[in-house]
Image (spheres, rainbow, N blue to C red):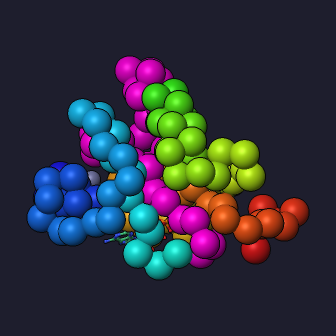
Amino acid sequence: MEDCIFCKIIKGEIPANKVYEDEEVLAFHDINPAAPIHILVIPKKHISMLTDLKEEDERLIGKIYTTINKIAEKEGFKEAGYRVIANCGKDSGQEVMHIHFHILGGKVLGDKIVG
Ligand code: AMP
Ligand code: ZN
């Protein structure tokens, strides 16, 4: 989709520090990390919000989670653990309107999910 920053990253029009890529999924380091490990995992298919997901996307969303496992293994934080967050809509503070899954880790994150 035009004017979508993550679609531009997928097309190579904006650089990103990639950690994983296949035909359906891309992962790259967040430009403004909130933790020592902060990776964004996105589907290459443009879906604006989690509320736009359709039944046909169920396999793709499952694949995102198995891809997160692969990234955790490859990047060496599988044992230590991590947190996955996906924002949806205004109250969540979603800024980029292309669904994305934040992987946060590299330190003890504490017991608060909401900061
Ligand atoms: P959210 O608030 O869930 O929409 O998160 C959007 C995330 O995208 C933020 O953590 C930003 O730091 C990150 N971000 C925005 N632009 C870029 C970019 N060009 N490369 C990497 N991360 C980005
Ligand atoms: Zn997009």
Please tell me which residue is depicted at 66% across the width and 61% down the height of the picture. 105
Question: Which percent across, then down, holds residue 34?
Answer: 59, 75
The part of the image, by quadrant, that contains residue 54 is top left
Please tell me which residue is depicted at 34% across the width and 40% down the height of the picture. 25
Question: Which percent across, then down, holds residue 53?
Answer: 44, 35
Q: Is residue 6 left or right of residue 28?
A: left
User: In the image as oriented, which residue stretches furthest toward the bottom?
Assistant: 32
Q: Is residue 66 left or right of residue 54?
A: right
Residue 97, can we see it? no
The part of the image, by quadrant, that contains residue 111 is bottom right
* Numbered label tally: 0
Question: Which percent across, then down, holds residue 22?
Answer: 28, 36
The stretch drawn in magenta includes residue 70: no
In the foreground, 115 or 107:
107
Please tell me which residue is depicted at 57% across the width and 46% down the height of the picture. 72
Using the image, determine if residue 49 lies above or below residue 97.
above
Using the image, determine if residue 82 lies above or below residue 59.
below
Using the image, determine if residue 39 lies above or below residue 47.
below
Q: Which residues are magenta?
A: 34-61
Question: Which percent across, then down, holds residue 32?
Answer: 47, 78
The stretch drawn in magenta includes residue 42: yes
Residue 31, can we see it? yes
Q: Is residue 55 left or right of residue 2?
A: right
In the foreground, 90 or 29:
29
Please tell me which residue is depicted at 80% across the width and 66% down the height of the picture. 108
**Quarter placement of the C terminus:** bottom right
